[in-house]
């Protein structure tokens, strides 16, 4: 198969390998197979992979909290960039969110992720300022 399709937990091994290979994409304990499986179940129909000849070359995690959408781990293998794969995935997520009545979506991009920041800026996403994101492990 070639093209965009819904993400399933069976895609995990290829997804995590792609994520680990992408400069600027941070992988943490939150990205364990168990946690991704829970995320996909909670946000069914919102996350996608792009596959070429059985190989996952693009991923996007998407979900919402009932009022705002969130996108994580948008990744396209470097040799497949500049082919609108990332844009197709983003467009599909935004469509799904809109269908659910969600009218705004956020993405967190690490400051030194040059490729990611360029992608989002080039695609007319507004870089926000005036607030900080704090994180803490729960254990």
Image: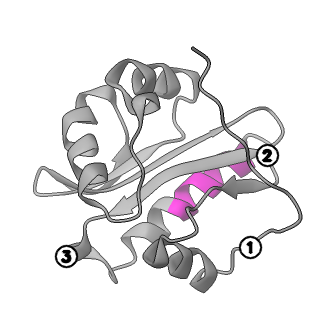
Q: Earlier in the sequence, mark 1 or mark 2?
A: 2
> Is the stretch drawn in magenta largely helix, strand or loop?
helix
Find the residue positioned furthest to the top: 139
How many numbered marks have been drawn onto this rendered protein structure? 3
Q: Is residue 139 above or below residue 130?
A: above
Q: Residues within 10 Å of mark 3 (few under 14, many from 20)?
A: few
The residue singled out by tag 2 in the image is 102
Where does residue 101 sit, x and y in percent of width and height? 81, 43
Label number found at residue 127: 1
Q: Is residue 110 magenta?
A: no
Find the residue positioned furthest to the right: 130
SS at mark 2?
Answer: loop
Q: Which residues are magenta?
A: 90-99
The residue singled out by tag 3 in the image is 79
Task: Pick the residue in front: 92 or 82.
Answer: 82
Residue at x 20% of width, y 35% of height: 13
Q: Quadrant of the C terminus?
A: top right
Find the residue positioned furthest to the left: 53
Q: Earlier in the sequence, mark 2 or mark 3?
A: 3
Where does residue 30 sit, x and y in percent of width and height? 46, 30
Q: Residues within 10 Å of mark 1 (few under 14, many from 20)?
A: few
Where does residue 56 sit, x and y in percent of width and height? 22, 52
Residue at x 58% of width, y 68% of height: 111
SS at mark 3?
Answer: helix
Q: CA distance from mark 1 to mark 2?
A: 19 Å
Residue at x 58% of width, y 74% of height: 120
Where does residue 129 sit, x and y in percent of width and height? 83, 68
Q: CA distance from mark 2 to mark 3?
A: 33 Å
């Amino acid at each position: 198969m070639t093209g965009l399709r819904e993400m399933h937990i069976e895609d995990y091994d290829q997804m995590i390998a792609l994520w680990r290979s992408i400069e600027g994409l941070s992988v943490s304990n939150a990205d364990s197979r168990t946690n991704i499986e829970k995320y996909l179940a909670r946000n069914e129909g919102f996350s996608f992979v792009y596959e070429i000849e059985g190989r996952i070359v693009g991923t996007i995690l998407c979900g919402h909290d009932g009022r705002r959408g969130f996108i994580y781990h948008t990744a396209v293998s470097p040799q497949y960039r500049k082919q609108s794969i990332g844009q197709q995935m983003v467009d599909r997520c935004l469509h799904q969110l809109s269908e659910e009545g969600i009218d705004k979506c956020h993405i967190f991009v690490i400051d030194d992720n040059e490729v990611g920041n360029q992608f989002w800026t080039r695609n007319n996403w507004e870089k926000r300022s005036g607030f900080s994101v704090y994180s803490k492990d729960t254990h």
